[in-house]
Amino acid sequence: MEGNRKERLYGIDFIRAVCALGIIAFHFSCHTASSIRPFYIFANGDFGGLFVAVFFVISGMTLYYNHPKAGNLKNFYLKRAKTIYPPFYIAYIVFFIKSVIDSKNFFWGGNPAKLLLTAAGMDGYLAYRVQGYYILGEWFLGAIILLYLLYPVVAAGFNKSVIASSAIVLAGYIFACAATFFVIPLEENLFACLASFFIGMIIAKYKKQILDNKWLVIPCAAICGVLFFVRIPANSIEMSRINNSICIHIMGPSLFICLYHAGCLINKCKAAGSVISFMGKLSYPVFLLQHRLILEVLVRKNPDSSVKAYVALLFITLLTFAAGWVLSELLKLPEKIRRKSSKKK
């Protein structure tokens, strides 16, 4: 049986909302023609990698918190698929049609067999090897799908021995850092993604000692502050890459804990809590849509002045959340239709 549903953690909504806003700002910074680059880079990496690491921590934490045992595998995987694929397919179809119209070619991505990667949600994760029909969702989507597939095995090992499973995950991460034959970037390597995901599981298992400990915010904030401003020296590009990855894996859970407690405080204000809850629930649709919408807007008008750039960022943010809300409402339509039909009967 799957784990019993626990009390809702409102601080998680705040983390999701902040990360969604941060990812939008980061990708805007990647493509803007202006000098305005909010949440772009810090001393030991970029904010895109940091916010993705926090997303992995969220995923591992909430999954283990609600389902410490995967239980029936069919039910477990079906529930994950229902969460991931319907929003992805709806959003993808919209932009796929646009690509067909723009290119005047239904198979604009080449071999139609590559659409199988898209259907599996893996085209973004494997884009470094296979160029095909990838237009939506980021590499993170494929990574989280793989982590969900592995979760029953990871959770079983974790429940049997925290120390042994932690050692295995750490060894895998060290292997990913040291190996030179991986083509995939280190931050996208499944071993690295699993490390942040696994830390989230640890936070969930030891919630009282970690997440409920308000004093832990102080060292976590100090860690984030130091690594944000102080560059860890490296004598080569490869060592710099590894240093950045290590820093992000340390900052990710540290920022997670800081944001969680900030979210708990903000949630005490009912109005603010409602806004944060609304934004947090839209984090996945926003994540799916944000990069594509940023490109669609900036390719038409990419302001180079500061004021206009801030206006563009605000517009893109509002547009993305509005589109995310529309997508979430479309997903509710089948259930609404079913309920209306039941009432008529």
Image (cartoon, rainbow, N blue to C red):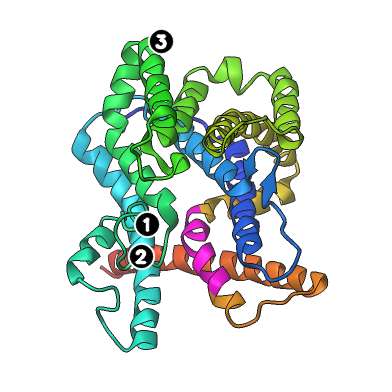
Amino acid type, label 1: Gly
Left or right: 231, with 96 as reference point = right
- Look at mark 3 in the image and give the residue it sits on: 163
**Image coordinates for residue 49, horizontal then vertical, percent:** 55, 44
Q: Which residues are magenta?
A: 284-295
Residue 170, percent across and down? 42, 21
CA separation in Å, label 1 and label 2:
6 Å
**SS at mark 1 in the image:** loop
- Residue 286 lies within the magenta run: yes
Q: Is residue 106 left or right of residue 206?
A: left
Q: Which residue is mark 2?
A: 134
Residue most extreme to the front: 235
Foreground: disc 2 or disc 3: 2
Residue of label 1 = 124
**Mark earlier in primary sequence (3, 1):** 1
Q: Amino acid at mark 3?
A: Ile
Residue name at image x 36 percent, y 11 percent: 164
**Residue contact at pointers 1 and 2, CB within 8 angstroms:** yes
